[in-house]
Amino acid sequence: MSAVAERTDAPAETGSGMATALRTELRKLATTRLWWILGIVAVAVAVLVTVLTVAGSEASEHPPLDIFTGALIGGVQTAYMITAIVGITAVTGEYRHHTATASYLAIPHRGRLISAKLIVLTGYGLLVGVVVVGVCSAIAAPWLSARGLLGGSLTAGGVTRAVVGGTLSIAVMTAVGVAVGALLRNQIAAVAALLIYLFAIEQTINSIALTRPAYPFLPGGAVQALAFSGHRAFGSATGAELLNPWLAAVLIVGYAVAITAIAVRTTIRRDVS
């Protein structure tokens, strides 16, 4: 076992150990241009998807809130997949470029360092989510109204749930990306595993009547419930009845924490490089 791995069994740092880890991760985030470039890409692509969705919308009998959420959700889903990849890359990139060794030497408590990364990247996802949902909402609502597609009024509570749910879904998917990256450590494998799981395995479960009831309780189903504000949004391919958004939020955060905990235990037992 390497010297770095042995140091993980040393007593935890006292005082500002977690604060030091958080400052370290914040510094990495602030000085790495790739994360901000990908954040801008997430916003730009989300806006494009929202514009295309609204432009292709036609008159329907759906409630106004469903129409608004349907116009918003495409951009939100695109954004949270990009930020999930950011979360994966933020962890796996350290192993790929061998900077994890220096990080663990500076802060030997690996669980603390991964937890700090999880917190900081979730904050990054929340920031991107605020921008994405704010810009997409500002485009979708007046455009839909001008086209006469909002036949009724949008309730303030409904809009708030849609906006908050969309924002939080981007943040929590960033956390899931960090957790998956910490667990698998290989960037290509982690990205492929996440995409295959969400778009192949979970969608297969959702498409089969016998397994469909389990879908809302899976990570993809939970994040959709959060993003869709707990109802089957207009344009959604979801066949299952989604969970309450707050229950979905707790569930998806639980998944991220559980995956991270498994990653911490397995990572501690493996050499960094």
Image (cartoon, rainbow, N blue to C red):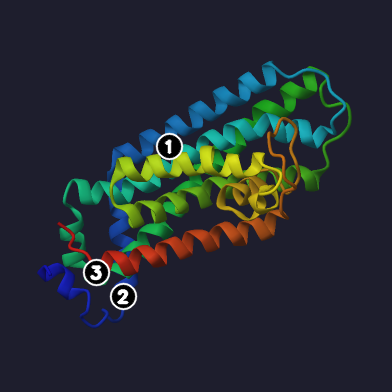
- Image coordinates for residue 81, horizontal then vertical, percent: 48, 39
Q: Residues within 10 Å of mark 2 (few under 14, many from 20)?
A: few
Residue type of the residue flagged with mark 3? Arg
Q: Nearer the viewer, residue 126 or 111?
A: 111
Q: Which residue is mark 2?
A: 16
**Is there CB contact under 8 Å for labels 3 and 1?**
no
At a point 34% along the width and 62% down the height, the residue shown is 114
Amino acid of disc 1: Gly
Q: Residue at x 62, y 21 (%)?
A: 51
Position in image of residue 72 (x %, y %): 66, 33
Tell me the kind of residue under disc 2: Ser
Q: Identify the mark nearer the N-term, 3 or 1.
A: 1
Q: Residue at x 26, y 72 (%)?
A: 109
Q: Which residue was labeled with disc 1?
A: 39
Which is more N-terminal, label 2 or label 3?
2
The residue under the point 68% across, 47% down is: 212
Q: Nearer the viewer, mark 3 or mark 2?
A: 3
Question: Depth-wise, is mark 1 or mark 2 nearer the camera?
Answer: 1
Locate residue 70 relative to residue 193 in the image: left or right: right
Instruction: Find disc 3 in the rendering and name its residue.
Output: 269
Judge by depth and name the residue closer to the eye, 64 or 26: 64
Callout 3 environment at 10 Å: few (<14), some (14 to 19), or many (20+)? few
- Say whether residue 176 is left or right of residue 233: left
Would you say residue 137 is visible in this rendering?
Answer: no
Q: Is residue 223 left or right of residue 107?
A: right
Q: Quadrant of the C terminus?
A: bottom left
Q: CA distance from mark 1 to mark 2?
A: 30 Å
Q: Nearer the viewer, residue 30 or 186?
A: 186
Q: CA distance from mark 3 to mark 2?
A: 25 Å
Dot 1: element: helix
